[in-house]
Amino acid sequence: MTVVRYILILVLPLIVGTRALASSTASGLESLRQRCERERSLSSYETLDSLASHLNRQALQAGDKRQQAFATFYMATARVFTGQGKEAQPLIDKAWRLSREIHNDSVGALVMNIRGVYQAMYLSNSFLAQRYFFESLDLAKAAHYEKMKIRIYGNLLILSKSTDDKQMFDYARAIYRYGRMHGDFEQTYMGAYYLALYYKLNRRYREARLYVDEALALYRRRPYEDVASVYVLSSEIMMETGNLSKARQQAAEAIEMTQRWNQRSLMPDAYLQMAYVDHKEGRYEESNQHAMQAARLSRVSDLSCRIGDCYQLIASNYVRMGKKDEAIDYLMKANHRLDTLCSVNMQRLMHERSMLDNIQRKEAQAVAHQQKIEGQRRMLLTLGGVACALAAVLIVIIGVLRSRNRMIKSIVAQNVRAVGEQRFLQQQIVKLEGRIATASIRPGEEGTETDPPRTSGMKEMGARASGTLTDDDERMAQLYERCCQLMETQKPYHEPHFTRDKLAALLGTNRTYLSTVIMMKGGVNYQQFVNSYRISEAVAILSDRSRLDYPLKQLWSDLGFSSSSTFYKLFQQSVGITPSVYRRQFLKIEEEQRNLDEKE
């Protein structure tokens, strides 16, 4: 007994000391996490990044995966809102893996929410952003994380930006009331901002000004670093109500705030809003300068989805200034940006659909395997097991079909919108070119036109774009542009056997050099280049309500395909669905729209 007593005397202090040290470490980590949350609520993202990195190091030393997950989430959030999207993406993936390892739905909800923000902000992919927000909402509900649910409602509201959306209004009001009820500063100013945004979208400017003024008053009481977005909204409201001097003042405040707090993700919006105010006041040169700055900052922060808006505003300014060639150049750039964005989003949607299919297939296999094991163990329950298996498979099939139908509808709707916007831009270009052609007719020489010096204009544009291009690079860029213009205007690909030699002859070059140019500038071979125009025209025809009776059997031959199988295969590879499925879905969308119009 004496020996045991001595052992206890020696060991017990060590046990108690170890537990006290572990408790102290956990308390320190939690205190550091709360500091991170406070900086996040104030949008102090540079400070947040530093604190989160420190929290991550401490959590790694302590082996605390929960705090590691929080730290990684905070670092990802800081990167997203400081224009470092590429660095944020792997951190988001890591935070998600950690949240699943520790089965923590609260962290999972935070991660899915910032993943949705990343999709909306950097990739302009509303479909995936909405999907991630709803997944975040499910996790927040499972974790009874009320404050997180309110934050997700706000993100859904910004993503919607639709008028007369009662649900979005309810979201905004719920956020505002939650903040007021709980004395939560962040939720109160966010709710005020969302309500101002809702009323502005619905042209109820008096209510919008009341709430935007309240958001700014809250800022003066307790500064938060992303206040620039509130100033931008205030400037938009003032501009739309005709108070241009106040709109200019608010836009200038937005620019100053983004610079003061180094809010790189908000800088393009602030400069673009100032450009819109300049445009309204007839200051077209200043408007172009601010729009150019917004486009440059968007490229620096990898926010390419905003560049198209900048180019469209610049083109509009050039139209007002009477500079038709420059206007056409920037309309073409905006059109190219739109095409690129639609193509990238389509590829991401297809990749996401493939991932969903794989997950569902693995889940179905796991269910089938489990059913087999249960059947071997319990022979008496064979019939019941079979019934459960059939029910589970049926649920999976229904889920897959619904998911597939939603995906198909999204694909067709995006293509229809893209085709409509592309047609609008092309009409604008044709109008401008017609005006240029009319202006070039000299008195006494009626019926004689001189083409605008597009080649020299394109050379100047190329020189402006990069002062380091070699002569060969410039020649290749010019030839590629001529090639694209020829394909878009004359559509020689309608000829079934449109060879490289024929295209080279039309362009005044040889087939080998032409192939090299297409590969270098377009990233595809000759046949892929030609087929891309055929598929694009097929999508445009299938998205045209005036050509619903166009036979599919005739479509592939009119577009120059050698066989229907080739056409169907390439269409499915490019768009993700067959032409017949595309047309059926388009007809459904048209019917739904007609029903809505009749109800209104």
Image: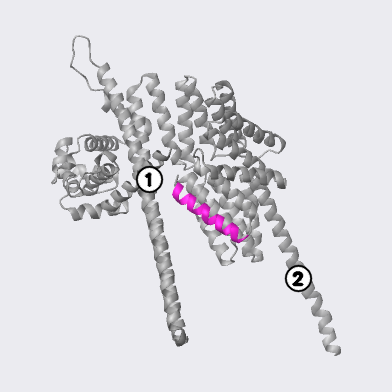
* Residue 313 placement, left or right of 499: right
Q: Which residues are magenta?
A: 126-143
Residue 510: quarter of image: top left
Q: Is the residue marked by circle 1 packed among few (<14), some (14-19), or many (20+) residues within 10 Å?
A: few
Q: Residue furthest right?
A: 2
What residue did someone put label 2 on?
19
Q: Which three-letter amino acid code belongs to the residue tagged 2?
A: Arg
Percent x, y of residue 290: 49, 28
Query: Where the N terminus falls, by quadrant?
Result: bottom right
**Vertically, is 194 above or below 366?**
above
What residue did someone put label 1 on?
592
Contact (Cβ within 8 Å) of mark 2 with mark 1: no
Instruction: From the viewer's side, name the closer residue of 344 and 382.
Output: 382
**Vertically, is 467 above or below 81?**
above
Residue at 52% across / 56% down in the picture? 135
Percent x, y of residue 484: 25, 38
> Disc 2 to disc 1, how far (Cα)?
65 Å
Residue 583 is tagged as none
Question: What is the basis of the colouring in this image?
Answer: one colour
* Residue 156 placement, left or right of 473: right
Secondary structure at numbered mark 1? helix
Q: Residue furthest front?
A: 599
Residue 140 part of the magenta-drawn span: yes
Residue 263 visible in the displayed image? yes
Q: Which three-letter amino acid code belongs to the residue tagged 1?
A: Glu
Percent x, y of residue 369: 43, 77
Instruction: From the viewer's side, name the closer residue of 287 and 599.
Output: 599
Residue 551 part of the magenta-drawn span: no
Residue 466 visible in the displayed image? no
* Residue 386 placement, left or right of 45: left
Chain-order first, disc 2 or disc 1: 2
